Amino acid sequence: MALGKPPPSYALAPPPIKELSEQAGQLVSCTSTFPQGVLRKEAVWAAEETVQALDALAKHFLSNCALEDTATHGDDYLTTTGAVHAAVEKAVKISDSEREAIAKAWKANAEGLSDSLGDVKEMMEEQGKKGDNEDEEDGFDDGWDEFGKEFQKKLSPEERERVAKVRGQL
């Protein structure tokens, strides 16, 4: 009734919000039972997101309970209610095992790793094209000169060899 269709019944909101708060406490308590690892991090993250959404919803309803005129509230409560539903849906979809959690985390980070690898390959190709003529200026400002000479060093032959080995393994 309090969280149903517009207009909201702000005076009836505190009991359901209190119950949701108690259940949120139980949710947080459950995350401590997970063993250390990626699965636990995923569970803690889902619990934190859910609790934050519930907190925003509770603050909205409790701050508006004192106001008599419900017409002045608008539909802001629908946004906070939707955030709670979205957080709960994400929490329901946490991994079933540590292996699945690791695979999910790896997949999420793979794109960033792939982009970084592409940058390294591009840098190596650029270094290879310049060859021994390291003083050649191509007119391109990559912004590294702002950090000083330490960051403007060219790769040594040993570093080039190391990167070539890494490229060969990937």
Image (cartoon, rainbow, N blue to C red):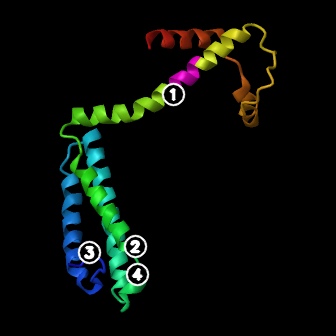
In the image, which residues are magenta?
Answer: 115-121
Determine the CA span between mark 1 and mark 2: 39 Å
Question: For mark 2, what is the residue?
Answer: 76
Amino acid on which disc 3 is placed? Lys
- Write the residue at 25% across / 57% down: 88
Question: For mark 4, what is the residue?
Answer: 73
Question: Could you tell which of marks 4 and 3 lies nearer the N-terminus?
Answer: 3
Q: Residues within 10 Å of mark 4 (few under 14, many from 20)?
A: some
Q: Residues within 10 Å of mark 2 (few under 14, many from 20)?
A: few
3 or 2: mark nearer the eye: 3
Q: Could you tell me if the residues under marks 3 and 1 are in contact, i.e. CB atoms within 8 Å?
A: no
Question: For mark 1, what is the residue?
Answer: 115
Question: Could you tell which of marks 1 and 4 lies nearer the N-terminus?
Answer: 4
Determine the CA span between mark 3 and mark 2: 13 Å
Splitting the image into 4 quarters, where does residue 73 fall?
bottom left
* Secondary structure that dominates the magenta span: helix
Amino acid on which disc 4 is placed? His
Q: Nearer the viewer, residue 54 or 132?
A: 54
Residue 27 spot, x, y in % from top left: 21, 59
Question: For mark 3, what is the residue?
Answer: 5
Q: Could you tell me if the residues under marks 1 and 2 are in contact, i.e. CB atoms within 8 Å?
A: no
- Write the residue at 30% across / 35% down: 104
Q: Could you tell me if the residues under marks 4 and 3 are in contact, i.e. CB atoms within 8 Å?
A: no
Determine the CA span between mark 1 and mark 4: 46 Å
Please tell me whether mark 3 sits on a helix, a strand or a loop.
loop
Quarter holding the C terminus is top left
Question: Could you tell which of marks 3 and 1 lies nearer the N-terminus?
Answer: 3
